[in-house]
Amino acid sequence: MSDQAGKAELLRSLHIPGAPLVLPNAWDVGSARAVVAAGFPVVATASNAIAAALGYDDGEGAPSEEMMFVARRIAAAVDVPVTVDAEAGYGMGPRELVELLSSIGAVGCNIEDSDHAAGGLIDVDIRATYIAQMRAAADGIGVPLVINARVDSFFPTSPLAETRKRADAITRAAAYWSAGADCVFLPGAGPQDLRAIVAEVGAPVNAGLALKGGSLDELRAIGVSRVSVGPQLYRSALDHLHSDFQSLFETRK
């Protein structure tokens, strides 16, 4: 546990406003080792990419056992801290989820507030209570799990009207931060939304970065503490694979 606790504290310490932790998300052992070899200090998994590689849809379409098996293999294959995208928790209770993450060697996780069973977003108070119970469970086992609370107000599947998204995101981010989350993640948020959340909530903020057309300098200036690319590297790798296949196919003629 002491090694995991040290890795968790290292991961937490790397969330610096204006000098964000950059995470090129991995989907298997090979991609995780490539992240480390490139010099990045942390490996983060991308549930979307792992599910796709396993042949399932995103949004908890893959069995949790298969998703966590991949995460376990990644954590065992690298020496740096590993943070796992746990989606919405796969129907597990907060203690069960924390104990599972600890058992596979993870020291951080994403937990989102999309309701994959009923659609829409989980009630903010229910999700905040879940996060508070995760924090208590992590403290109880002696591994200070770094909880990245994903706020899906801006997500493409969000049912909220555009005029309500920013206010809803601020409410959710503040509630999760108060409940014990270490960071709040706002996928789909624009620069003005991010500025408002950084200013009004005060929590370390995780933003997504587009590989094409994204500006890391802009995110630094906004004051975000963490930057993720999600499943984009997996998709880029597939694009290269398809290009290679096409070249091979052409040589057959």
Image (tube, grey):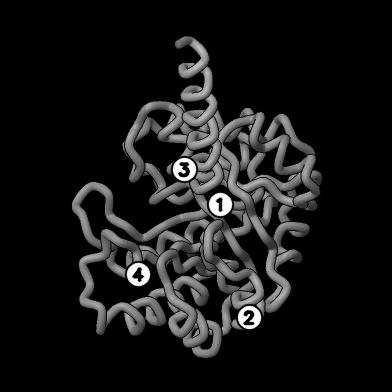
Q: Is residue 121 visible?
A: yes
Position of residue 141 relative to residue 249, above or below, is: below
- In depth, the one of 43 and 9 nearer the eye is 43
Image coordinates for residue 227, horizontal then vertical, percent: 60, 63
Name which residue type carries label 1: Cys
Residue drawn at x 55%, y 57% is 211
Q: Position of residue 184 (x, y in %)?
A: 51, 69
Q: CA distance from mark 2 to mark 4?
A: 19 Å
Task: Report whether residue 136 is seen.
Answer: no
Which of the marked residues, 2 or 3, is nearer the chain's N terminus?
3
Mark 4 or 1, closer to the camera? 4
Cα distance, mark 3 to mark 4? 18 Å
What residue is disc 1 on? 109
Secondary structure, mark 4, is loop
Q: Position of residue 40 (x, y in %)?
A: 75, 51
The mark nearer the N terminus, 2 or 4, is: 4
Label 4 crowd (10 A; few <14 / some 14-19 / many >=20): many
In the rendered structure, the answer to whether residue 122 lies left or right of residue 218 reads left
Kindly identify which residue carries mark 2: 223
Which amino acid is tagged 2? Gly
Please determine whether, in this image, residue 128 is positioned above or below residue 223: above
- What residue is pinned by disc 3? 47
Identity, as a three-letter code, of the amino acid under mark 4: Phe
**Front-lying residue, 237 or 77:** 237
* Residue 67 placement (x, y as % from top left): 47, 33
Q: Tell me the residue at 46%/55% (across/down).
A: 111
Identify the mark nearer the N-term, 4 or 1: 1
- For the residues labelled 3 and 1, the Cα–Cα distance comes to 11 Å
Measured Cα–Cα span from mark 4 to mark 1: 20 Å
Q: CA distance from mark 2 to mark 1?
A: 22 Å
User: In the rendering, which numbered label is found on residue 154?
Assistant: 4
Question: What amino acid is labelled 3 in the image?
Answer: Ser
